[in-house]
Amino acid sequence: MAVRKKDPWIPDLAAKDSVLAVACGVANASEDVRATELEFDAISTDFAEPWLAANDHPAYG
């Protein structure tokens, strides 16, 4: 895209970045959002049982 055609987009992107920054600030200040983040952080990546390989699964064996 030619530089002369990019210029009109720059203020629009700056305005959108500003709105996004404000939205992030509001979300970060929310106690509900913080509580949800803590719940997600508490999810363990360790599973109680190992996943069965497809070949070992009774439905496929």
Image (cartoon, helix red, strand yellow):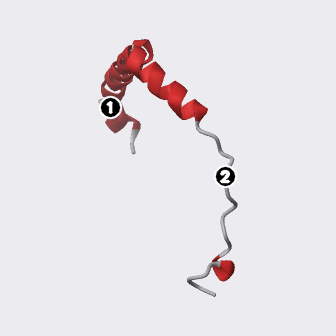
For the residue pair 5 and 16, the one nearer the viewer reads as 16
For the residue pair 1 and 13, the one nearer the viewer reads as 13
The residue that label 2 is drawn on is 48
Q: Earlier in the sequence, mark 2 or mark 1?
A: 1
Residue 49 occupies quadrant: bottom right
* Other residues around mark 1 within 10 Å, as few (<14) / some (14–19) / many (≥20): few
For the residue pair 34 and 42, the one nearer the viewer reads as 42
Q: Is residue 51 left or right of residue 7?
A: right
Q: Are marks 2 and 1 in contact (CB under 8 Å)?
A: no
Residue 47 image offset from top left, x and y in percent:
66, 51
Provide the secondary structure element on which disc 1 rests: helix
* Other residues around mark 2 within 10 Å, as few (<14) / some (14–19) / many (≥20): few
Residue 33 image offset from top left, x and y in percent:
42, 22
Q: Is residue 9 left or right of residue 45?
A: left
Q: Quadrant of the C terminus?
A: bottom right
Q: Residue at x 29, y 30 (%)?
A: 8
The residue that label 1 is drawn on is 9
Q: Is residue 11 visible in the rendered structure shown here?
A: yes
Of the residues shown, which amino acid type is indicated by label 1?
Trp
Residue 7 occupies quadrant: top left
Q: Quadrant of the N terminus?
A: top left
**Which is closer to the viewer, label 2 or label 1?**
2
Tell me the distance, in whole angstroms, between the alpha carbons under discs 2 and 1: 51 Å
Q: Is residue 21 visible in the rendered structure shown here?
A: no
Residue 53 image offset from top left, x and y in percent:
68, 73
Q: Residue at x 32, y 37 (%)?
A: 5
Residue 30's label in the rendered image is none
Of the residues shown, which amino acid type is indicated by label 2?
Ala
